[in-house]
Structures are given as structure tokens and as C-alpha cells.
Amino acid sequence: MNVINEKSDVKIGKKERDLLAIKIDSDELKVFNIEDVRGHLTLPIQGKNNSFITWKSSDPSIISPTGEVRRPSHGEGNKTVKLTATITISDQMVTKEFSANVPEMPKKENYERYVFYYFTGEENTIGEQIYFALSDGNTPLKWNELNKGEPAIISNLGEKGLRDPFIIRSPEGDKFYLIATDLKINGNWDWDRAQRTGSRSIMVWESNDLINWSEQRMVEVAPKEAGNMWAPEVIFDDTTGEYVVFWASKLYDNKEHNGSTYNKMMYSKTRDFYNFTEPEVYIDLGYSVIDTTMIKHEDKIYRLSKDERSNTSSTPNGKFIFQEVGDTVLDPNFKLIQEGIGKGSIGAGEGPTIFKSNIEEKWYMFIDEFGGRGYIPFETTDLQAGEWKISENYDLPARPRHGTVLPITKSEYEALQANLLT
């Protein structure tokens, strides 16, 4: 990053300094995913040297000057849109053009199978990494492991351990973002270190087909006050057209991260998983809450989280899942529906993942019985009631832990089967 410092450049005039700053900001100006635009774009409005950036679009019906994208309907063909940035400081300005390639919307297909992304625990010699499995038919209760039961994605960055993989399909349907916790406990088992001086970054991959994934990238999103960034997940907020990324962090009031605190749920917004808004507190109940997950149904957001308190007579729902409902993702007044989900059926629970059945009005929630069997499937036909029961006759992969189940189309299933099922 190049920033012009006025004091260090007193030997040149203001006009020359402004022109140099504009040139640097123009050279560094990027628009991510411009070659293959499958969702809204981040169009920067300010450069590193405090230049102002305005945008024009050759076709605002496809890409607006603020980056909102309306892709052509399926069958209309792909479009190319010219975006022109004007970079200005005082009365000096330059322009820079970008050619945006916008593919038509994909063909609509029903979801007929499921794919499962998970990690398997800390005891593996290679530590925590990401595994894939495919459903055996159109049920999320029977699974076939992919890649010979070996990890399908291994971390080469950060702590070189991957936990809590979460995948989201874009609202357009043909772009996927896979993220995970940057944490390797295997080999040290130091949970205190992981929450005081652990990674503040998420690991990110992108794909258009669930087969070919981008290079792993590490993006620091949590604030410097945070000692950790655990179990990041994503939901698309259609009220703002942004992805909301949320995770658990312990926040400290000193740079050494000394003293006692507890995990709060945090959030940040993004369009492209490169540029993120400043993180803010999302859930703070005065005690540790982690592993939040969400699903939308009938204009309501259903939110499930882990009560991280010890399980005692005064906190009888500690170490179990509680469920809330709100009107929007960032509704400040979520209402409690149910606490202690799973009590009596499992020893303790964390890392819930929730998804809807492909074939009926039923929802599944897998709960990680940590220290026990790993994921156990629960189900309900009434999200509003919050009454969950263990599914019958299930056969999950070997000790799957905190991950994601994603409904997929038959063609996506066949591609995964052909490439990774052995």
C-alpha cells in the first residue's frame, strides 16, 4: 500500500503531489470478481490517499453505479458492461475503465441430494481439516464419504488447521463460498492460548461448481481486541443485498489480552469476501455464546446458538443449544423460543447446522455431541415451536463434527460423484 505523506513531500507542489496520489490510487484500484460477475460488486469510493472515486456504468440495468447487479435471465445470454471510475483529489482527476463480464442466470433446478462438509476432530495425526460426503439418495440421514474418506481440503496457511467449515450458495444459485475457522488444537491442546492470541482470520475458498475451488485465502476480519475468531458462518441479508458473516470472539480491553472475558457473537458485512465492514457485536448476553447458525423461513430468521456456560443447577441449559426468532438478520430484538435443545438425548451439544428437507416441510439440525459421538441429527416439522427430536435410522460418516449440509441439484450431485466418490 502506497500512501503519500504531505510532510515528506514538501519539496513538490500541491498539484504534483495530488497527481502522484491519484496515480497511486488509480494503479491500486481493483474490483474483485470483475471477470465473472455472479453477484453484487464492491465499487470503492475512496482511495488510500483520500481520493474520491465515483463510478459510471455503460448499462445501469445490469450493473448500477453503486455495484448492484441484475444478471440477465437464463436464455438472454451473457453481457459485458463497461465500468468507469473517476478518481479525484481537489481539482485533479483521472479515469480508469473496467470490463465486467456478467453471465446469464443459471437454469432453475430442484434440489434432489445433499453434500456434507465437516471436520472429524483433533485426534487425527494431520490435525483438523475439511472432509466431504454425499447423501445416499435424497435423504440427509444416509451418507457416502468422498475422496476415499480422506480430507478434501487441507490448510496451507495460518495455523494450518481447519475447523467448522461453512458453505453458502449465492442467491443467484451458481456461486459458492466456503469458509472455516483457522485453528489447530491437535498437538498443543491449549484452548486458553486459542482464545487469547489465536487467529483473527477466516479461511475462504470460492467455487462455481463445487468441484473446482479457488486458492485458499486468509482474511483478517475480527478486530485487534479479539483473541479468537471461531466458527464463522454466513447468511445472505436480502434487505441489504449483502452477506453477513458472524462468529464468536473474546474481546479484551488491553493489548496484552490479559484478564477474564467471554465469547460474544460478532458480525461483519461483505459483498465479495475480500472487503468487509468494521466488525460489530451481534450477541452479548453477559456470558459466553458461540456457534450461532441461522435459517430463513416465511420472512422470519430462526437463530440457534450454544450456551457456553457450565451445566449446573443454576445454569441447567449450559452446554446446549437455544433457539430464537427475529424479523431480520440484524433484528436487535430476537425472541427466545427454546433452550436446552438435545437435553436427555445427548450429553452436550454445540456446532448446530440447520437446513430444510428437499422433499417435505421438515427441518434438520445436526448437533455436535462434542466429546462424544460427534454430529447427531435432530428434526422438526415446526420451526416456530422449537421442538426437536432425534432422527431415526441414520448413518452418518465416521465422527463428523461441526460443519454444513448443503442441498444440491441432481447435476451437481452427479458431478461430485464423478470427481470425488470412490
Image (cartoon, rainbow, N blue to C red):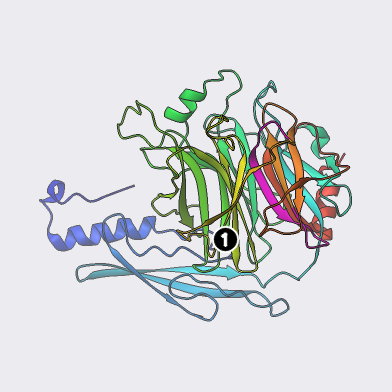
Does residue 220 sit above or below 45 in this rendering? above
Q: Is residue 220 visible?
A: yes
Residue 403 figure quarter? top right
Residue 226 figure quarter? top left
Q: Is residue 272 visible?
A: no
- Could you say which is closer to the camera, residue 329 or residue 186? 329
Kindly identify the residue that appears in the image at 15 percent across and 51 percent down. 6
* 264 to the left or right of 51: right
Does residue 286 sit above or below 370 in this rendering? below
Residue 320 figure quarter? top right
Please rate how many residues cluster around mark 1, counting C-alpha atoms within 10 Å: few if below 14, some from 14 to 19, many from 20.
Answer: many
The residue under label 1 is 236
Residue 142 image position (x, y, % from top left): 86, 44
- Could you say which is closer to the camera, residue 237 or residue 201? 237
Residue 121 image position (x, y, % from top left): 68, 28
Residue 79 image position (x, y, % from top left): 61, 75
- Could you say which is closer to the camera, residue 310 or residue 402? 310
Residue 155 magenta-highlighted:
no
Q: Which residues are magenta?
A: 346-363
Q: Secondary structure at mark 1?
A: strand
* 146 to the left or right of 372: right
How many numbered callouts? 1
Residue type at tag 1: Phe
